[in-house]
Image: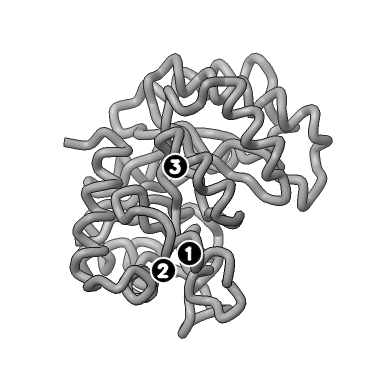
Amino acid sequence: MIFETHAHYDDEKFDEDRDELLIKLQEEGIGYVVNVGASLSSTKASLELAERYEYIYAAVGVHPNETAELNEENFKWLSDMADQTKVVAIGEIGLDYYWKEPESQIQKIWFERQMELARDKKLPMIIHSRDAAKDTLDMIKACDGGSIGGVIHCYSYGVEIAKEYLDMGFYLGIGGVVTFPNAKKLKEVVQYMPLDRIVLETDCPYLAPVPNRGKRNSSLNLKYVAAKIAELQKISEEEVVEVTYQNAKKMYQLP
């Protein structure tokens, strides 16, 4: 069984065949899916998916580029939603300087608030960091994020920063990018890090792996990610699938 730790099945790219695909996932060996909130509306949609499907869980949170929508009133709503039974994480939260919106100071305010929310609710964090390596790491350290725990989603930096996160006890989310020919840094990280700190993810509908790069991504493609990790770590695909499954259950505190 494969554990999909980061999906966005509420995305409009799944509108035409969402239910059909979600049923197929179970038939194809996907044991669990965590659907991740990236805005207030997608958090709501993630909760609805978790209600409808036994094997889907939800993460509640607001992506850094959507943090301009946050205020005290809707942050209270987010906090209340985090108490729902099938919520397993706060995320995705963090910093994203690629798009530069909203300004970094707003992103930082709500990143810190959402980290504290994760601490209050005793839930792991799903961290998004793009073109913001130093600030993300500095803020997590300042917040003692290692005591909260979670995953650095779609890990994209080098071995040096990976070591910092691994030393704090974080997992690294590895997805389709590891199969790209030009993903030299990420391949070095996967070769360096212990298997018991890797979790599988797609970030679907984005970042489909080779051989489906450029197409709509889904959890059905996780077998290609597992195969590439197995090749890089010189172990069997079965071991990758089994260990990452257990890693994800432990990270998300599932029995």
Q: Earlier in the sequence, mark 1 or mark 3?
A: 1
Q: Residue type at mark 2: give it.
A: Asp
The answer to which image quadrant residue 174 occupies is: bottom left
Q: In the image, is 138 to the left or to the right of 122?
A: right
Secondary structure under tag 3 reads: helix
Residue 23 percent coordinates (x, y): 26, 63
Q: Nearer the viewer, residue 204 or 193?
A: 193
**What residue did someone put label 2 on?**
17
Residue 167 can be seen in this image: yes
Q: Earlier in the sequence, mark 3 or mark 2?
A: 2
Tell me whether circle 1 and circle 2 mark residues in contact (CB < 8 Å): yes
Residue 13 percent coordinates (x, y): 54, 65
**What residue did someone put label 1 on?**
14
Tell me whether circle 3 and circle 2 mark residues in contact (CB < 8 Å): no
Q: Residue type at mark 3: give it.
A: Leu
Give the position of the N terminus as an image quadrant: bottom left
Residue at horizontal 58 percent and vertical 36 percent from the top: 93
**What residue did someone put label 3 on?**
166
Q: Residue type at mark 1: give it.
A: Phe
